[in-house]
Image (tube, rainbow, N blue to C red):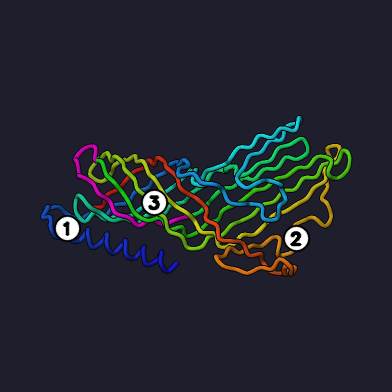
Amino acid sequence: MKISLKALVICILISTSYVVQAQDDINLGTSQKFYFRVSAGYSFESGKTEFNNADPNGLTGIMQSTDVTVNADGSVNVKALNGTVGAGVKANATIGYMFNPYIGAELGVSYFHGDKTLIGRLRSPQVVSEENTYLRGFDVAPGIVLTPNFKTINPYARMGLIVPIAGELNIETRAKQANAGGPGTDIMVEAKSEVKASFSVGYFGAMGLNYPVNDNLSIFAEVEIKNLSIKSKSAEITEYATTAISNGQSQLVPGKQLSDLPIYEKQFEFTDDFAQSSTTVPNQNEPRKIPTQFVNASGTGINFGIRFTIN
């Protein structure tokens, strides 16, 4: 975390120093300007990787990052699942300052509403299990802006850092086993988990076109690439229910609900270094230690918006 904070500070200082030096070296005879822009857009997955293990208790029978189909004749089809949680809708508000017509600095705040993504599935005549995940949260993005300052359609480039500040990763799990409660009685297990993040830093780059409507208002469109890997801090199963289904009727199974799970099976802590024993029974009243995981939230998308310039 300390290294990431230092990198953030150094990047901002270097960018600011460069901008100020460029301003001193160029005599342009134009006023400096503040601007404010708002935008919305959509990101697609990019830089796909394997998904993390989302079922440490082994409730679903799903192998990590796979889509497995077991056919009635005993044959098995296995498909690898790779991707990111970086696909979804994004809304942004940014304030910026042009030191001169060519170089500026800005600070943006974005909300990301991620799509639900399949990260694991098992289908067979007896069992149907599925895991889906989605990311929701806010981030801040300090950066610099470069533009040739054309009078009509004006191209520009933005680049900088992404720092998540709030939000969480949600995982939804659903497993149904035929006749697991006896002939004609299926057992359904449904769970929802929340993963909280440690301090993480990514980076972004964007290229776009800005079209002036008048002296103070313009519209823009851009292509943005973000590279973001979020370090997991902790996870908790927040919803858990086991239901018996028979003749279209369902009822909760006693002893197999969220309140019946020990802390060891519903709270998890991610760490780089921990010790465990193969002979000692774990303390069921403490969170389980799990090796550190990183959530790939990278994506490539398109943004559209308007920009207000304050003279």
Q: CA distance from mark 2 to mark 1?
A: 62 Å
Image coordinates for residue 151, horizontal then vertical, percent: 19, 40
The crowd level at tag 3 (other Cα within 10 Å; few <14, some 14-19, many 20+) is some
The mark that comes first in sequence, 1 or 3, is 1
Q: Which residue is mark 1?
A: 23
Q: Secondary structure at mark 2?
A: loop
Q: Are marks 1 and 3 in contact (CB under 8 Å)?
A: no
Q: Nearer the viewer, mark 2 or mark 1?
A: 2
Which of these two is toward me, 275 or 303?
275
Structural distance between the alpha carbons of marks 2 and 3: 42 Å
Where is residue 265? Give x, y as percent. Answer: 71, 60
Q: Secondary structure at mark 1?
A: helix
Residue 5 relative to residue 85: left or right = left
Vertical order, 58 against 265 (above or below): above
Q: Amino acid at mark 1?
A: Gln
Which residue lies at the image location 27% right of the left edge and 38% below the top edge? 211
Q: Nearer the viewer, mark 2 or mark 3?
A: 2
Furthest residue in direction front, as rendered: 279
Task: Give the residue drawn at x 32%, y 61%.
Answer: 11
Please report the bounds of the magenta region as a residue range. 138-154
Name the residue nearer the viewer: 268 or 140: 268
Q: Which label number is shown at residue 93?
A: 3
Q: Which mark is residue 261?
A: 2
Mark 1 and mark 3: Cα distance apart in space:
26 Å
